[in-house]
Image (cartoon, rainbow, N blue to C red):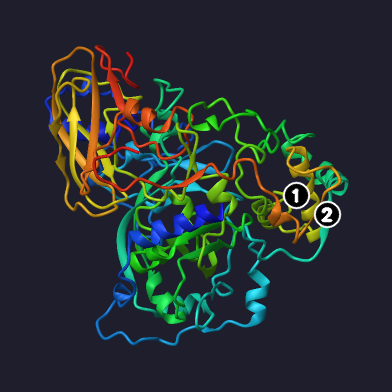
Amino acid sequence: MRGTVARLVLALVAAGCGRGDRAAVHTGSPARFGFGRAATTADVSAWDIDVTPDGTGLPPGKGTVPQGAAIYARKCAACHGPTGTEGPSDRLVGREPREGFPFGRDPRFVRTVGNYWPYATTLYDYVNRAMPFDKPGSLTPDEVYGLVAFLLWRNEIVADTTVINAHTLPQVVMPAHDRFVPDNRRGGPEIH
Amino acid sequence: MADASISRRTLLASAASAVGAHALSRVGRAQVPAQATHPVVPPDPTKVPGSPPSQLGQRSVFEQPRRIPIGNGHSSVAPIQDLYGIVTPADLHFERHHAGVPVIDPQRYKLLIHGMVERPQVFDLDALKRFPAVSRMHFLECSGNGTPSYRGIRPNLSPQLIDGLTSTSEWSGVPLAVLFREVGVKPGATWFLAEGDDAAVMTRSIPIDKAWDDALIAYGQNGEALRPEQGYPARLFLPGWEGNANVKWIRRIEIADRPFMTREETSKYSDPLADGTARLFSFVMDAKSIITFPAYPVTLPDRGWWEISGIAWSGRGRITRVEVSTDGGKRWEAAELQQPVLPKCHTRFRYLWNWPGGATTLLSRAVDETGYVQPTLEHLQTARGLGTAYHFNHIRAWRVQSDGAVTFGLEG
């Protein structure tokens, strides 16, 4: 998928250049205004919680499938269902269909972590920042790792003995990870 | 004509046509909720003094346009059939949020810009407002707009329920390029992450060229501070790009050399396609139009002259032409475009129609400055597949029955 990312980056960089010229609202604008203040290390560390596909941003800690199952039952099942399939909120679990990627053709298939999400690291990033819905940002790193392990196992992507941590999570290859392509719409008469 | 059930559109039509007032009472849209409290209306307003001035104006109690909350409590749609021209009043601007509307103290607000920069900086609201500012008219549209018109079409859908996730405002703020120049973006930077200060801590990755082009950190909307639902006190604004990427309540920007692959840009806001792939980062909203009058639930009381009216817009620039068909697509004629026609902004179109009576179908199609022509539903379904998600910009159809009732969709 890194190859796909690289192609995306190249395509979008090639699409437009001309940086900087329009930054000046007025002719004669200074190179810098000097407004604001320098960010401190504390400013950055307090908010820099993102996790990227190469694992950058993952904290120390670890979690297992049984640990995650217990947390899921307590903090997630009320919205996502006892097994992650019942809802009422987003369905998290499901590998159907086993073959192909028919979501564009057929609206009957529900997109889940197992059949649609391209990156396992996104699970950590999202659960950590936004879940549980009624207490976002309340989970410890070990709890998030455990939930990620549980959801990956429920989606038949890792074994029930798997330990998820900053080293193992970026190595998990999601079933749908080669299905994603950059935007090919460019305006003009063609309909894509 | 003091009857509050007669809508403004009825009054407008009355002035522009010879249709009788008796017949017009059937056109009303039941816009006024039953619980609206009406002031005492004097028999002759010239014979009693009116109200004194006030600190804050209110709409006439005879006008009660309303957003409609939809879905699972995270969206509301704007009453596009009740609006004139191109501007959306800020309190009727559509809403889409992922964990509710946060309350943010402007005194404590700050925006952090870090990552691949020479000088990581923190800007409070006063600092943001001290930079040279710009104001621009642009539409903002959720890329899920139009979903009810793509599959499972129902005849009893109003413009609001079909396409109410679009609104136009004058947005004021500081160009993101000014801030990026201020922090000194390092060579090799190609993307940035935008993060919100809401309970979803919403994140999207944005190609950095959009910052050098026309992105804003906006703090003003239609002449006043942003509404809380629109990101108070500051939001990212990306002209012409799908609503979700315009991160509200923005607190952090991290500049990088790759996208971050957040949940909102992978599992959501990606477009599964008929060929077994899914499109990532489909930011631009393609050209689109919808007739907002006549439209469900309006019933035309009589044949004769009616002004067909609607809005058109394109995320790629200006609308250059809107064509209207009053016979189900056999003949197309150019509608009049109301000035100003602005890039990446709603454009009002009008077409004078002499309805001869009888059932027919009304259509509109927009063309933008790239030569893109709003496609038919069949064309878009062939290109993307019936199961695709987001970016439903195909032609909308209104069926006029012989009794004047208007319903959504191609079928009678």
Q: Report the amino acid beneath label 2.
A: Gly
Q: Position of residue B15 (x, y in %)?
A: 15, 34
Residue displayed at 36% across by 46% down: B285
Evaluate whether residue B32 shows in this view. no
Q: Nearer the viewer, residue A142 or B122?
A: A142
Q: Position of residue B134 (x, y in %)?
A: 32, 70
Q: How far apart are the alpha carbons under marks 1 and 2?
A: 8 Å
Q: Chain of mark 2?
A: A
**Residue indicated by mark 1:** A148
Q: Chain of mark 1?
A: A
**Residue indicated by mark 2:** A63
Q: Nearer the viewer, residue B343 or B188?
A: B188
Q: Quadrant of residue A48?
A: bottom right
Q: Position of residue B192 (x, y in %)?
A: 49, 65
- Residue B287, numbered circle: none
Mark sitting earlier along the chain (1/2): 2
Residue B374 lies left or right of residue B198; in this view the side is left
Q: Are marks 1 and 2 on the same chain?
A: yes
Q: Position of residue A68 (x, y in %)?
A: 83, 47
Residue displayed at 58% across by 69% down: B105
Question: Could you tell me which secondary element the residue under label 1 belongs to?
Answer: helix
Q: Report the amino acid beneath label 1.
A: Val
C-beta proximity under 8 Å, tags 1 and 2: yes
Residue displayed at 81% across by 42% down: A159
Question: Could you tell me which secondary element the residue under label 2 belongs to?
Answer: strand
For the residue carrying disc 2, how many other residues have a C-alpha within 10 Å: few (<14), some (14-19), or many (20+)?
A: many
